[in-house]
């Protein structure tokens, strides 16, 4: 299933797809947007609210390269890490090769491909075939993931079905029935056509054949989906294969137990000299700022009292390393003469003020630290720092060079179409 996270192709939000799946009576649903996990968290969060109906949410992705593609579904947390690594490599590695990449990194993943030739290449690259449903009780599931040949149950698959299943059988790769959902319902197909055409910068009547998803690529009921699989097998002269395809689908879902903890911050640690603790380093840095910010003894006494109170709470909530990292980044910008401005609720912290992250005295202006950080706050606080747009890339490069390209990530924001822009695009 693809949501509008498959940019300018998918038409529905993950929340809409989850709600529709529950209406139709599904027990499990996989989100496999193209080359990304942009909406995986939203998908998991909304499915987690499904209550007694308990929809099992399977986060995954469709990994593509040129004309080749593979659906990747993590079995567990190890598979999730593998999937994240493959998607990152797909974006950053100019020499990325899908077969080589999956062959080298497939631990904890279900790998589903539609081409027997691609399946053969992946087997040769070291990806083990999955264990089919009929064999899972006879053999220990030393690896619960593995390679599958995906069959989507569309009429156009009938002609080559026998040949594809035969090739997969020779490879020892089991076939599994999958879905091909790009749309919430049949009425979304026109919106999909417009979105794909907009991505191509073309007129809709000039789009080449095969540009759009199949008109049946909507979220059908479980009974309708099963009927399609059986009809496709019967039409392809392989009616007896339908039971195995459907049983393998159930087996694949059973083996997916990837649970991603939500709402638990995974906080970074600041690199420090041996023997120096984070609490000690932050205390030393803030004490150094007392003399700069508060020149009179009376002002220092009030500042020290508030500083100690804030440091205790910051340490108790596990944010000491975070403050040190932000202070390092701001200090680097300052040392290079790059203007920066700390803003937002972080300006209510005297620790931020003493570190030079912000330049507003919270004591003078009566700002409440608890607005920024308090034990009952469930979301993770952040220190907002604006950098000079002309030289911000220098600061970003410093962060990558200091902490490592494998430990630094940047986020993106995606603009969505409002009614007027959608009408203009359609016109």
Image: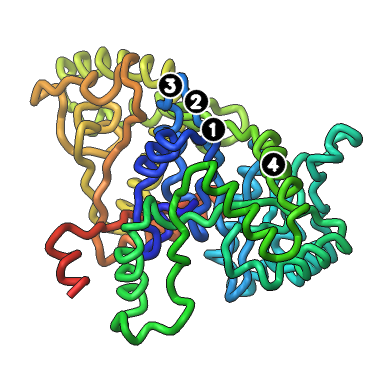
Identify the mark nearer the N-term, 1 or 3.
Answer: 1
The residue nearer to you, when weighing 13 against 92, is 13
Q: Which residue is mark 3?
A: 51
* Tag nearer the camera, 1 or 3: 1
Q: CA distance from mark 2 to mark 4?
A: 18 Å
Task: Look at the numbered discs 3 and 4 and tell me whether their residues touch, using CB distance below 8 Å.
Answer: no
Of pointers 4 and 1, the one earlier in the residue sequence: 1
Whether pointer 2 and pointer 3 mark residues with C-beta atoms closer than 8 Å, the reply is yes
Q: Is residue 13 left or right of residue 70?
A: left
Q: Earlier in the sequence, mark 3 or mark 4?
A: 3
Q: Residue at x 61, y 52 (%)?
A: 178
Spatial CA distance of label 2 from label 3 is 6 Å
Task: Give the image location of residue 132, x and y in percent.
Answer: 80, 45
User: Going 31% across and 57% down the picture, which residue do you hit?
Assistant: 187
For the residue pair 377 and 149, the one nearer the viewer reads as 149
- The residue pinned by badge 1 equals 27
């Amino acid at each position: 299933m693809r949501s509008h996270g498959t940019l300018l192709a998918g038409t529905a939000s993950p929340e809409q797809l989850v709600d529709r799946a529950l209406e139709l009576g599904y027990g499990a649903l996989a989100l496999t947007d193209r080359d990304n996990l942009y909406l995986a968290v939203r998908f998991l969060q909304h499915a987690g609210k499904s209550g007694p109906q308990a929809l099992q949410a399977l986060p995954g992705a469709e990994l593509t390269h040129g004309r080749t593609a593979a659906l990747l579904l993590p079995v567990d947390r190890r598979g999730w890490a593998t999937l994240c690594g493959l998607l990152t490599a797909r974006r950053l590695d100019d020499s990325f090769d899908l077969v080589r990449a999956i062959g080298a990194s497939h631990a904890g993943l279900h790998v589903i491909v539609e081409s027997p030739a691609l399946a053969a290449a992946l087997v040769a690259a070291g990806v083990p075939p999955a264990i089919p449903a009929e064999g899972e009780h006879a053999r220990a599931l030393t690896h619960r993931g593995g390679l599958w040949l995906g069959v989507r149950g569309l009429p156009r698959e009938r002609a080559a079905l026998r040949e594809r299943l035969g090739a997969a059988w020779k490879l020892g790769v089991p076939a599994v029935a999958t879905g091909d959902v790009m749309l919430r319902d049949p009425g979304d197909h026109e919106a999909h056509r417009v979105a794909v055409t907009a991505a191509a910068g073309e007129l809709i009547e000039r789009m080449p054949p095969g540009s759009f998803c199949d008109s049946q690529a909507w979220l059908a009921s479980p009974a309708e989906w099963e009927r399609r699989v059986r009809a496709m097998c019967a039409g392809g002269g392989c009616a007896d294969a339908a039971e195995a395809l459907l049983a393998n689908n159930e087996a694949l879902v059973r083996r997916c137990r990837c649970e991603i903890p939500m709402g638990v911050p995974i906080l970074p640690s600041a690199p420090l000299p041996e023997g120096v603790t984070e609490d000690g380093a932050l205390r030393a840095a803030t004490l150094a700022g007392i003399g700069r910010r508060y020149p009179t003894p009376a002002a220092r006494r009030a500042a020290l009292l508030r500083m100690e109170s804030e440091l205790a709470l910051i340490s108790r909530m596990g944010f000491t390393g975070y403050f040190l990292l932000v202070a390092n980044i701001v200090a680097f910008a300052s040392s290079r003469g790059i203007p920066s401005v700390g803003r937002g609720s972080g300006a209510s912290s005297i620790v931020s003020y003493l570190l030079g992250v912000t330049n507003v005295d919270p004591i003078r202006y009566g700002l409440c630290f608890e607005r920024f950080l308090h034990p009952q706050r469930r979301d993770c606080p952040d220190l907002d720092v604006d950098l000079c747009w002309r030289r911000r890339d220098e600061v970003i490069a410093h962060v990558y060079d200091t902490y490592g390209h494998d430990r630094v990530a940047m986020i993106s924001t995606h603009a969505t179409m409002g009614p007027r822009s959608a009408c203009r695009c359609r016109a």
